[in-house]
Amino acid sequence: MTNHWIDIGNSDCILIMGSNAAENHPISFKYVVKAMENGATLISVDPRFTRTSSMADIYAPLRSGTDIAFLGGMIKYILDNNLYNKDYVRAYTNAPFIVGNAYGFKDGLFSGYNRSARKYDKSKWAFEMDKKGVPKMDRDLENPGSVFQLLKKHYSRYDTRLVSQITGTPEADLVKVYKTYAATGATGKAATIMYAMGWTQHTVGTQNIRTMAIIQLLLGNIGMAGGGVNALRGESNVQGSTDHCLLWHIWPGYLKTPRASNVSLAAYNRKWTPQSKDPISANWWQNYPKYSVSMLKSFFGENAGKRNDFGYDWLPKVDDGKAYSWLDLFDEMYKGTIKGFFAWGQNPACSGANAGKNRKAMANLDWMVNVNLFDNETGSFWRGPGMNPSAIKTEVFMLPACVSFEKEGSITNSGRWMQWRYEGPKPLGNSKSDGDIIMELGSKLKEVYKNKGSVFREPILNLKWDYTTNGMYDAHKVAKEINGYFLKDVDFPKKKKSFKKGQLVPSFAYLRADGSTSSGNWLYCNSYTEKGNMAARRSQKDAVNKIGLYPKFSWCWPVNRRIIYNRASVDLKGQPLDKNHWVIKWDGKKWIGDVPDGGWPPLGSLEKPNPKSKWAFIMRKHGHAQIFGPGRADGPFPEHYEPQECPIEKNPMNKERMNPTAAVYGTDADAYATCDPRYPLVGTTYRVVEHWQTGLMTRPQPWLLEMQPQVFVEMSEELARLKRIKNGERVFATSARGSLECTAIVTKRFKPFKIGGNIVHQVGFPWCFGWRWPESGKEESANLLTPSVGDPNTRIPETKAFMCNVSKL
Amino acid sequence: MKVTRRKFMQISGASAAGLAVSGLGFDLSPVRSHAQMLKTKHAKETTTICCYCAVGCGAIVQTDMKGDGRVINIEGDPDHVINRGSLCSKGAALFQLGENENRLLEPMYRAPKAKKWKQVSWDWALTQIAKRVKKTRDATFARKNDKGQVVNRTTGIVSVGSAALDNEECWIYQALMRALGLVYIEHQARI
């Protein structure tokens, strides 16, 4: 989230699309309701009339997988009716930038497409630069080559009639949503978006969110209280585990995983440190080497130094242009190239798209380590439905982890708040904290690698591994390492500060690239300082602006800034655009309110900015938010493509039916079916309030299982009549990849869609089930149906829109 | 004296133990339920953050300090600035996540082609895992790729998980996996 949960209460208009917050993030609704009590409008856009919809002022249905068409129509509406916030757009976004002549868009393809490689040459989308190397701009937004004019042209096709034919949303509903939401383009008004996996789990997932980000920028809603782009994250620490980068492509703090072509630390830092020639651009990532070197010092401690490139060669490199994502690794496992597998606190036998492929893949392994609270469908895959244990050679080690309140440590919520929690009871039985298991495994590995004949043992032996106290894992020691230490006495004459060796670093502004500081994750530098454990703070006192920041309750990254991009919440003089819910304010000498995005003074003017000031979007190389996004794999502007599996032969918007860069796979388990009479129904998945994710932490609980005991398929009364299916009856659901038995729930919540003159039915399945619980073994994962196909930027699978069928048993 | 809701509960708890109630000006002890006394009398109180979705709601865990050392009750934390004491159905069932007979309590091992689990010791399990990791890693380790560039990695071992870990656990876990040379490191955020 750019903002945070409490801040939703400051909004004038809340769009909930791609999420069902009332059911899946129930406590967030405390703040939705608060905003509504203060006059805010709630809009719900969803294929199904959900619990969120039932609270909304406006509900609009859409067919799964058509969000870009829906939102693209809103962009057109905003531009056609001059509802954008011109002062904001020209000052803070790249709308004034001039795009080079090589850029083009025709028949659904941007310039630079290579069909055999299914990739774009993104250099075709570059900005025009002036002699100094700064992007050329037209702050009046009139140059036909400007981002603003190209945006207008691109979305000129998205009229409500065509949008309605694609999405199935009645035109009147579209206009109602557009008009209400776009009204927040007025200065002093803010609208927010609450989205979740309903937007990410598509072959156009990244561009779904980009489309909304463009809308938020046009309306001047980023950086504002009650605004922003807010991802409702589904797991209590999925924000933290992402920040610490349990992901193939990034190192802690969103540093890049080195590519094979980054042959030395210097080459790596050079490659990933952006250069800006604009003196008014903060270009914050110019500090990259300070963060990468400090991280290596946390990895290897005294064993890392200038003499050995701080241990850079000890860490693995990935091949340039190759992906090592979830879908890719299960594809490789299915093909048999992977021998060993750790499934740590995750249940891929139920959570992964095309779960049947994943389960079969596990039988190709030599060994698996499964760490969990319960004996799950992953650890026990070899005794699951359709498996023959005597034919499966995989060894499985299943280790019992304790629950979260039996140990101490921190987690980071969706609003980036890092919160400390404590040990209540000791771990039950012989279960252990994950921290203890990891520490002990690391020590065992160091032991077995003492042998001189071992392969490349330096990184294992040199890994700093002193995070225990009296033989037990110590979360405080790790938290301090993540924050970082001064490793020598260091002076900062400009800041008039000096620090002693062994002191904790007060913030990332003090990290250095010479090995004199450590920091396991620069983003968390400032979280555990000489003043103590910031995440454990409990102050009830709000900040001076009284917008619910609670700056001394827990801690949030970066540097306790509660609303990011907040330099865009003020005018050029530094005065708040929204006087009632102001975030920061320049008092003539300094900023007050939230921690500002840098302490530099206000810009003053666009024509002659104060040379001491910086453009608002400090993380961008050129200092401006990106309406035109030339870094994306599938184009600088979002474009509507149909899902990999869809009910129509042709994309009504352009000549490319599906995202031409989507990640597709080719094993016999990767079947896809479009316009196939065997699978005529659009399918989607979701959750229920009683269960969580695959249900592994809720299905073994009698209270919750009793409330929601069975996997179901939800369908319209119209479809049920057509299929002669009765409410409550057990039915059979199928897709090109798998099948499951489920209970039919016939409701008014789904309605048939009219898509380009045809009737299209949609059904939905909760994905919270699996054969381990309930004990009947008959309530299976809906991911047996979903396709292994991914977004080209993130490789997140398209589990929210696929084709299926339902029949009587 | 400013009394927060949490403080109020603590003070009213003290009144039941026979202490004077000076800050409140009235005595709540007659209206206190027997059940509430039971859950606080011999309990250690710790705060936690709910382990389900990412709203980050606060809860209070009461742990028995006299009997079996287990959880007596878990409820919403009224002084948590986000949830102010509220919890959803899952958060309200946190107690049963901890006190649950289905929990896995011992390390288990499944041998190749076996039809059953076998209970094993931690030391045996971790020793065997370390041996498997070493064997597979050493057999699949690549110093260079096809182009001859230094890569120092193994593609024979993969890891998925975990958003279920604390931040500090995530950090040491990724450090260990990367030190081993894994490149296939993924978790919930990818799906």
Image: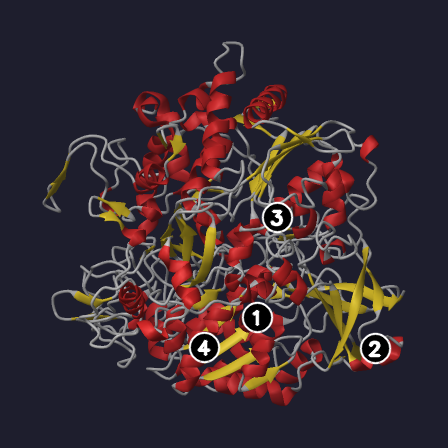
Query: Tag 2, which secondary structure?
Result: helix
Whichever of labels 2 and 4 marks the residue nearer the N terminus, that label is 4
Q: Nearer the viewer, mark 1 or mark 3?
A: 3
Check contact, mark 1 vs mark 3: CB within 8 A.
no
Q: Amino acid at mark 2?
A: Ala
Name of the residue lying farthest toward the top: A452
In screen coordinates, is A592 left or right of A763?
left
Residue tagged by mark 3?
B101
The chain to which mark 2 is attached is: A
Looking at the rendered structure, whether the residues under marks 2 and 3 are on a common chain is answered as no
Q: Real-space Cα distance between discs 3 and 4?
A: 38 Å
Whichever of labels 2 and 1 marks the residue nearer the N terminus, that label is 1
Disc number for residue A32: 4
Query: Tag 3, which secondary structure?
Result: loop
Q: Nearer the viewer, mark 4 or mark 1?
A: 1
The chain to which mark 1 is attached is: A
Query: Tag 4, which secondary structure?
Result: helix
Q: Real-space Cα distance between discs 2 and 4?
A: 34 Å
Q: Residue at x 65, y 71 (%)?
A: A66
| Residue A716 picture location, percent across and down | 77, 78
Q: Report the front residue among A726 and A462.
A: A726
Q: Nearer the viewer, mark 2 or mark 3?
A: 3
